[in-house]
Image (tube, grey):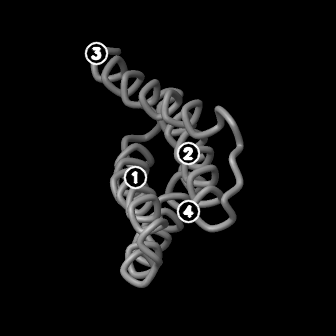
Amino acid sequence: MQRVWISAAGLFGAAAVALAALAAHADLAARGMVQSVATILGWHAPALLALALWNGRGGAAPGLLLAGACLFSGAVLLRAFADLSLGPVAPIGGVLMIAGWLRLALAAWRR
């Protein structure tokens, strides 16, 4: 699984940079949403990398972070560029990311 998390970290990092550049040129209505996604992915890229290097001691944290960031990012970008709402998908993604960070906090106390 380490390769999965490292690959996801690389993809998230690349997407964060590309989306930040895109946000600089996006119309005003989409700019804030695209920048939010760039920020989320930019924070979660190093988190996934660190979890991959922690040799699996993060438990379910990387999977929750990955799933949550993908759901959140996809839903927000669809809203920004296609004005298409996926209903509760973005909030579900947010809850999954929060759960991933809480799972990481708990993992620190496992033996």
Where disc 1 sits, the SS reads helix
Amino acid bearing label 2:
Phe
10 Å crowding of disc 3: few (<14), some (14-19), many (20+): few
On screen, residue 36 above or below 64? below
Q: Are marks 2 and 1 in contact (CB under 8 Å)?
A: yes
Q: Which residue is mark 4?
A: 7
Q: Earlier in the sequence, mark 2 or mark 1?
A: 1
Q: Which residue is mark 1?
A: 40
State the CA–CA distance, disc 2 to disc 1: 9 Å
Q: Nearer the viewer, mark 2 or mark 4?
A: 2
Q: Which residue is mark 2?
A: 72
Q: Earlier in the sequence, mark 2 or mark 4?
A: 4
Q: Is residue 40 left or right of residue 11?
A: left
Where disc 2 sits, the SS reads helix
Where disc 4 sits, the SS reads helix
Residue 15 appears at what percent x and percent y? 50, 70
Task: Point out which mark residue 109 bears.
Answer: 3
Amino acid bearing label 1:
Ile
Q: Earlier in the sequence, mark 1 or mark 4?
A: 4
**In which quadrant of the rendered view does residue 87 lie?**
top right
Amino acid bearing label 4:
Ser
Amino acid bearing label 3:
Trp
Q: Nearer the viewer, mark 3 or mark 2?
A: 2
